Image (tube, coloured by chain):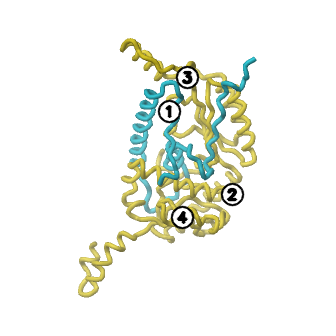
Amino acid sequence: MADPAMNEQPPKIVLVNDDDSQDLTLLDLVDHLLNTGVIIRGNLVLSLAGVDLVYVGLDLVVTSVETALRHMYPALPVDEPPINPKRR
Amino acid sequence: MATGVKARGMKSKAVATAAPRSRSQSQVIHLYGVTQTAGPSRESLRDLTGVDGKGAVEPLECSGLFCWISRVSEADFARDLAKNIQDLDWLAAVSTRHQEAVSAIARNADMLPARFGLEFSNDLSLRSHIESRKAALKADFERLQGRQEWGVKVFALPAAPLQRKKFRSGKEYLQAKSALSRPFPGRPDPGLLKFAEALESIADQIVEGGKFAAARRDLEFHKVVLLKRSDRPKLEALIRTYSRKWKSRKRVECTGPWPPFSFVTQTESPGR
């Protein structure tokens, strides 16, 4: 009998507070940082128009990365491009 | 600067030379979030760099609460912030450092995370804004005590992985390409509905996931869940159960623990 675990997709738990969390994506980060969180009205607040431009920029990046990966590795499920916190 | 031009005599010389330096050193206060308790010790944050990659992350007591801040360049984080965040390399580096600071502070303390981009010109300004929102912040601390948020996503996996092959015609290539980008049917999947119910049974509150991550076409389900810290094993067990159940059909991904970014009161949100 085939092992039922053979085809199982292991759950992916990305720990945000893990020092080595390389799998956290820029999309997840930006979703949290730019779009949620308590707003304490400072003197200087990032304008919503500025945030909207980031959306447009990121959308283009995701779409082009996804398209490129699908062409290169059509058999693989495509992951979001991870960012490497240790890079900079 | 204007002050340098208007100043007279010896003073004008001093101001004129000092002005560019003071302008480049001009700082604002970057806010990560607010805690009720003193939170982690300064010692434990010693190795942590601020959002700018240079400064420290420090607590500033404001009206009995603790604001977690870094002192950063006014030019980079206020004047040019809207422009800088368009640079994805800059945004990736800065948002990663911001999140690392938030995680370190929130690891063992309840924290109300601030929206990125809140900069204050000085301590007094921050203190007065916190004082004016103190009641709302206290209410949020009470409501969200001991709770964290988790992002839960379910991705559809290709039914039969396509093998790399040589296409005999342009038509065949286009058909294969079309199959890859085929949108998913709109009808809700009963398995997903059960998963959503199970998630609801352990969560305090659930909201829709963010719209950046929703850009993925294979994303079938994306919610953000508010969970007691002590209920984390229940979430992990649920995810394991459904990963087993769905096998190669779907992949579950869970990201957290975040401080409750999506559940804080955003009364001052200008309409988003």
Q: CA distance from mark 1 to mark 3?
A: 14 Å
**Regarding mark 4 in the picture, which secondary structure is present there?**
strand
The answer to whether A88 is drawn above or below residue B250 in the figure is below
Closer to the camera in the image, A54 or B126: A54
Camera-near label (3 vs 4) is: 3
Q: Residues within 10 Å of mark 4 (few under 14, many from 20)?
A: many
Residue at the location (47% across, 70% down)? B122
Q: Earlier in the sequence, mark 4 or mark 2?
A: 4
Image coords of residue B187 (percent x, y): 57, 20
Q: What amino acid is found at the position of numbered circle 4 in the picture?
A: Ile
Q: Earlier in the sequence, mark 2 or mark 3?
A: 2
Residue holding disc 3: B158
Which numbered marker is on residue B216? 1
Q: What amino acid is found at the position of numbered circle 3 in the picture?
A: Pro
Q: What amino acid is found at the position of numbered circle 2 in the picture?
A: Asn
- Residue B139 in view of the camera: no
The chain carrying label 1 is: B
Q: CA distance from mark 3 to mark 4?
A: 45 Å
Residue holding disc 4: B69
Q: Are marks 1 and 3 on the same chain?
A: yes
**Regarding mark 2 in the picture, which secondary structure is present there?**
loop
Q: Earlier in the sequence, mark 3 or mark 4?
A: 4
Residue holding disc 2: B108
Q: Earlier in the sequence, mark 2 or mark 1?
A: 2
Q: Earlier in the sequence, mark 4 or mark 1?
A: 4
